[in-house]
Image (spheres, rainbow, N blue to C red):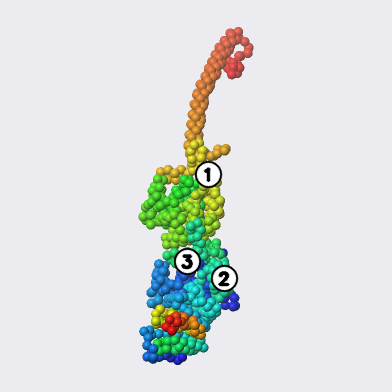
């Protein structure tokens, strides 16, 4: 990733929600883990919260100071900034079930459906 | 004990070390912690790991111009800053000067979900950034085991930690990693497997309600190190490991002599008193005058213009001053002049090490020539005999190095010298024993010198007299079975005096008698002489008479012959005189 941050915005007109999802993915260089994580994240978001999310990718190799703000130790780490409370999900997000639990999407899904 | 000398003659470069900045630790490790390598400091909660690490960092930044990074997994920056402020470390100022970076890594287990593969590159980046931002040479990770609680995947964690320590080494920073003590293991998660260059174990034990902290260098790869457990302290000046100074016996020996303050005691010690820098044990049961002798010693030092330090473990300063006035030792002027300082505290106030450090501190600051520890035996109530002995050894070594003459009053129970006293006594140069001598319904104080290294000393027992004239030593009367002291001695003195008087009177009388006899004899001689003279006189008279008669006779014979006209002329003179005489 050559850019510092990479923002993916989806139009939220399709399913307007009271909550906007602000997600931040911390990576360290373009490793296979970070690429996998980003792909997995995108897939999950598209499937469960389409149009309501905003993903920011932070490369710590370029912006090492940002690691302190969100208390990042492991990479890749996905931080759910909004909705509160803050959640952190470590790893390449290959375990979809656990990502959903981590993002509180599993329960929400069951309730809404 | 070992003093490690880096063998510079070796062709291979020996392990480089950096000063830990912690007093005493460099002595034990022979120069400090391994340079550019991680050191593991482990111990139970509250034994001073964080503080030790922090002091390592701060001393490095302040004294050796080696900036440092403190990465904390437990306390945040503000807490850390406040915690060490009590030790005089101003972390805010150091941070502002870019000498120290504090980085708090906070991980909330509840916020975290693991979803597959990850590594701790984030931590590496963070640490790397912190190190590079100030050019850090020292790093502390406190307590990295916090990660084990936060991250459920220990397999990843372990491999990442291994990589981290490797990375720290490659980075060339000297690091301290702290870890909690585990059951049967040095650390709870076996970190010693990864950080194997130097392992230091801290321990905090409570013995008879008094806590002592101890430090042990478990392992130091590529270096010789002291293997014992060393007591250490956390005081207002930071972390210090004892022994602080001398671990060898190479202190100077002065041949200067100083007065004990008691004239007769000096006389008993070859007439000159103690050697400067010697250690003197004054032992005795309660009330035998130990403190008085100590006070006299201090007084004598002050008179010489020397400073002295009086550690009182039993009485307060005012009490000592008041009590010593009763034997005309007014110490108050010396206190006012700053020649005498008191440190009065109960021994149970703190552990032995704390006492030791207080004493070190006080001696370093006040620089006395004379120190009194009254009574040293009270310290035994604080530790075991072995601990006290080792503490005293260090203390005596310290005093000797500083050329301080130390007097240790020691309280004994019972008449026999107790076991502990014997243990202490071997450390001492002079042992003055005071004891109660009970006889004739009263108690008196006796004083001996049991030993005095390197000087001739009296083997006699003396009686100590404490009066308002001060301390006096007088000879005792040694009888066939016992010695006489006190009233018995005075009685004996009286008896002897009477005897002398009686003898003197007898002499005088005899002299007078002789004088008289001489008179009589002389008179008799005179009489006899007179008689003799009278006889001689009478005899001479007779002779004269005879001569006269002879002359008369001769004359008459001449006359007759002439008358008869004899043919031979008679001689007149010589005939008679020849015969008479």
Which label sits in the foreground, 2 or 3? 3
Q: Is residue B219 visible?
A: yes
Q: Residue at x 44, y 58 (%)?
A: B368
Structural distance between the alpha carbons of marks 2 and 3: 22 Å
- Does mark 3 fall on the same chain as mark 2? yes
Where residue B14 sits in the image (x, y, percent)?
57, 76
Q: Which mark is residue B461?
A: 1
Q: Is residue A79 visible?
A: no
Q: Residue at x 44, y 89 (%)?
A: A46
Q: Residue at x 45, y 49 (%)?
A: B291
Q: How many marks?
A: 3
Where residue B458 sits in the image (x, y, percent)?
54, 47
For disc 2, the marked residue is B219
Which class describes the residues within 10 Å of circle 2: few (<14), some (14-19), or many (20+)? many
For disc 3, the marked residue is B46
- Does mark 1 fall on the same chain as mark 3? yes
- Does mark 1 fall on the same chain as mark 2? yes
The outermost residue toward the front is A113
Q: Residue at x 50, y 78 (%)?
A: B173
């Amino acid at each position: 990733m050559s850019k510092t941050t990479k923002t993916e915005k989806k139009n939220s007109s399709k399913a307007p929600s009271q909550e906007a999802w602000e997600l931040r993915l911390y990576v360290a260089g373009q490793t296979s883990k970070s690429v996998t994580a980003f792909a997995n994240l995108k897939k999950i978001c598209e499937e469960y919260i389409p149009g309501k999310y905003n993903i920011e990718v932070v490369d710590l190799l370029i912006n090492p100071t940002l690691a302190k703000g969100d208390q990042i130790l492991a990479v890749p780490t996905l931080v759910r900034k909004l909705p509160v409370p803050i959640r952190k999900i470590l790893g390449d997000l290959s375990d979809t079930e656990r990502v959903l639990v981590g993002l509180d999407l599993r329960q929400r899904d069951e309730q809404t459906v | 004990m070992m003093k490690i000398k880096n063998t510079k003659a070796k062709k291979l470069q020996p392990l480089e070390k950096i000063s830990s900045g912690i007093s005493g630790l460099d002595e034990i490790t022979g120069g400090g912690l391994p340079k550019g390598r991680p050191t593991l400091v482990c111990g139970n909660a509250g034994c001073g790991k964080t503080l030790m690490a922090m002091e390592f960092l701060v001393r490095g930044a302040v004294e050796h111009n080696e900036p440092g990074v403190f990465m904390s997994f437990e306390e945040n920056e503000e807490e850390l800053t406040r915690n060490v402020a009590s030790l005089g470390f101003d972390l805010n100022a150091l941070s502002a000067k870019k000498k120290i970076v504090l980085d708090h890594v906070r991980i909330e287990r509840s916020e975290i979900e693991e979803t597959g593969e990850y590594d701790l590159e984030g931590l590496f980046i963070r640490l790397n950034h912190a190190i590079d931002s100030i050019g850090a040479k020292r790093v502390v990770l406190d307590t990295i085991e916090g990660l084990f609680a936060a991250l459920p995947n220990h397999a990843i964690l372990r491999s990442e930690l291994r990589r981290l320590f490797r990375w720290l080494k490659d980075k060339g920073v000297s690091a301290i990693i702290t870890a909690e003590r585990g059951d049967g293991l040095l650390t709870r998660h076996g970190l010693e497997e990864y950080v194997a260059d130097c392992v230091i174990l801290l321990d905090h034990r409570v013995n008879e309600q008094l806590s002592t902290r101890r430090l042990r260098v478990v392992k130091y790869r590529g270096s010789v190190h002291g293997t014992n457990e060393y007591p250490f302290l956390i005081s207002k000046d930071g972390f210090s490991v004892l022994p602080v100074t001398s671990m060898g016996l190479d202190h100077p020996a002065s041949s200067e002599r100083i007065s004990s303050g008691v004239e007769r005691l000096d006389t008993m010690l070859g007439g000159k008193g103690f050697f400067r820098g010697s250690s003197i044990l004054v032992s005795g049961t309660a009330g035998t005058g130990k403190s008085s002798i100590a006070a006299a010693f201090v007084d004598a030092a002050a008179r010489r213009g020397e400073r002295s330090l009086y550690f009182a473990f039993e009485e307060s300063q005012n009490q000592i001053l008041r009590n010593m006035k009763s034997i005309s030792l007014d110490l108050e002027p010396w206190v006012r002049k700053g020649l005498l300082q008191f440190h009065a505290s109960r021994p149970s106030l703190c552990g032995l090490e704390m006492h030791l450090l207080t004493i070190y501190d006080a001696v370093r600051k006040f620089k006395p020539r004379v120190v009194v520890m009254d009574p040293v035996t009270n310290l035994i109530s604080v530790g075991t005999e072995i601990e006290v002995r080792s503490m005293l050894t260090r203390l005596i070594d310290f005093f000797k190095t500083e050329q301080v003459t130390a007097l240790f009053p020691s309280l004994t129970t019972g008449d026999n010298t107790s076991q502990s006293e014997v243990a202490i006594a071997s450390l001492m140069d002079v042992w003055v024993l005071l004891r109660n001598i009970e006889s004739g319904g009263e108690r008196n104080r006796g004083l001996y010198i049991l030993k005095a290294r390197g000087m001739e000393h009296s083997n006699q027992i003396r009686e100590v007299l404490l009066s308002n004239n001060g301390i006096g030593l007088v000879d005792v009367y040694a009888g066939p079975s016992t010695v006489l002291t006190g009233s018995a001695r005075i009685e004996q003195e009286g008896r002897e005096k009477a005897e002398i008087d009686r003898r003197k009177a007898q002499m005088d009388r005899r002299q007078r008698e002789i004088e008289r006899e001489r008179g009589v004899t002389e008179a008799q001689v005179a009489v006899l002489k007179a008689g003799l003279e009278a006889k001689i006189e009478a005899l001479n008279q007779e002779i004269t008479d005879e001569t006269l008669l002879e002359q008369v006779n001769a004359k008459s014979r001449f006359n007759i012959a002439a008358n008869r006209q004899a043919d031979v002329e008679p001689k007149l003179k010589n005939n008679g005189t020849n015969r008479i005489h």
